[in-house]
Image: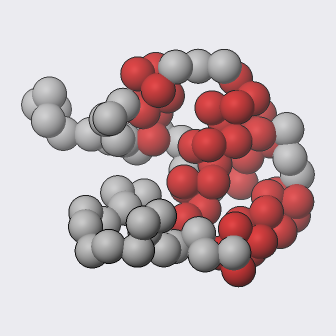
Amino acid sequence: MITEDAWVQVITAARPEWIFPFTGLQPTQFRKLVRLVAERGGDAIADGRPGRQWALDLPDRVLLVAAYWRTNLTMRQIGPLFGVSHS
């Protein structure tokens, strides 16, 4: 039984078959985008202060944002697909 607090990640960058349908990018293009985001400080907390750690790793965060922009789903809709809350 899955409780309301247990989040299950459905979409992940670790499964290349999810990349194109949700981003429109080929897996090689997506990996290049993730590398670029990492080089530009993608793993740093935005304001530089210590705080809550990311719930998703960088490739999954990039996939979430790309899917958000491409699909026009709301955060309330897309969050559960990635196993995170909309907040």
Which residue lies at the image location 87% right of the left edge and 64% below the top edge?
A: 28
Is 6 situated left or right of 86 in this image?
Answer: left
Is 60 situated left or right of 51 in this image?
Answer: right
Which residue lies at the image location 88% right of the left edge and 51% below the top edge?
A: 26
Indicate the colouring scheme: secondary structure
x and y, in percent, of residue 69 in the image: 70, 31
Which residue lies at the image location 42% right of the left edge and 58% below the top edge?
A: 56
x and y, in percent, of residue 6 in the image: 18, 39
Q: In this view of the protein, which residue sits in the foreground, 39 or 21? A: 39
In the rendered image, which quarter is residue 39 located in?
A: bottom right
In the rendered image, which quarter is residue 37 located in?
A: bottom right
Q: In this view, does 42 lie above or below 79?
A: below
Q: In this view, does 72 lie above or below 13?
A: above
x and y, in percent, of residue 42 in the image: 59, 69
In the rendered image, which quarter is residue 64 located in?
A: top right
Please indicate, yes or no, whether residue 1 appears anywhere in the rendered image. Answer: no
Please indicate, yes or no, whether residue 47 appears anywhere in the rendered image. Answer: yes
Which residue lies at the image location 14% right of the left edge and 27% below the top edge?
A: 4
Q: Is residue 34 above or below residue 71?
A: below
Q: Quadrant of the C terminus?
A: top left
